[in-house]
Image: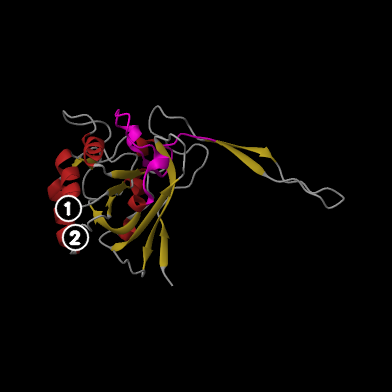
Amino acid sequence: MPRIVDLSQEVFRGQPVYPGHQPTVIFPMTQLTVKEDGKWTFAVNTLLMSEHAGTHTDSFTHMDPDKNALSIEQIPLEKCIGPAVCLDVSHVPDSAFITRNALQDACRKADLTIPPGGTVLIYTGTYERHFPRPDYHQKNPGLDREAAEWLANQGAIHIGIDAVSIDVSPHQGEEWKPAHTVCRERGLLNTENLGDLKALAGKRFIYIGLPLKVRGGTAGPTRAAAIFDLAWNS
């Protein structure tokens, strides 16, 4: 049987969200009650949350003003499932850039190559260090332009990270959001706010992360998982 590792954060009231985004609110709309005649009512919760709260996949309308940019329900699901690797860059300090050299070193140490048409998860340790304290959404390492371009050049089509953003927080350097910019330029998906990736560091697996089909969505909350011991036929 395949082994499945859940990579998603829970959705809960008070979860860390990107500064300025809608806080997550969950409250009961109806409660489960059982009547004397044996009939019952159903329990239902109401959720109020940002598309970008918790584990989510960005669409291209999130960062691309082109009228033809794809919203989340238009993203081909083939981009959301496939061969993957997880690169260990947990030595990179908070609020520092993850460089191409750091990614290449992680590949060499784990004897990994970037799977063409696949997903690269970036293990920074941010979730371990800071979640769910406020520091989690205020400081994290992120990819610089050269690193993001290198991943694209190796054939990656999807990047995921265990932090609030694939870009460094708070902002560093001259270019605004270089990692998101490369995703826009090169057609790369990115999934943010993954959970603890430590168990995946330096490993190969099958990644699946299907975003909710939000009409016109700039992102979709995502249930992400790593699947081991499952052959992938390209």
Check the image and tell me how it is coloured.
secondary structure
Camera sees residue 37? yes
Give the quarter of the image for residue 45. Answer: top right
Instruction: Count residues near mark 2 (Cα–Cα under 10 Å), then give few for <14, some for 14-19, many for 20+.
Output: some
Amino acid under disc 2: Thr
- For image coordinates 22% across by 43% down, the residue present is 93
Magenta-tinted stretch: 48-77
| Residue 58 or residue 29, whichever sits in front | 58
Classify 51 as above or below 100.
above
Quadrant of the drawing holding the C terminus: bottom left
x and y, in percent, of residue 149 in the image? 17, 43
Label located before the other in sequence (2 or 1): 2
Whether residue 133 is visible here, answered yes or no, is no
Q: Which mark is residue 92?
A: none
Identify the residue at image location x=17%, y=52%: 154
119 relative to 216 in the view: left or right:
left
Query: What amino acid type is highlighted by mark number 1?
Result: Gln
Q: Which residue is mark 2?
A: 113
Image point (20%, 62%), residue name: 112
Mostly what secondary structure, the magenta segment? loop
Q: Is residue 176 left or right of residue 63?
A: left
Residue 90 magenta: no
Which residue bears the numbered disc 1? 154
**Front residue of 43 and 219:** 219
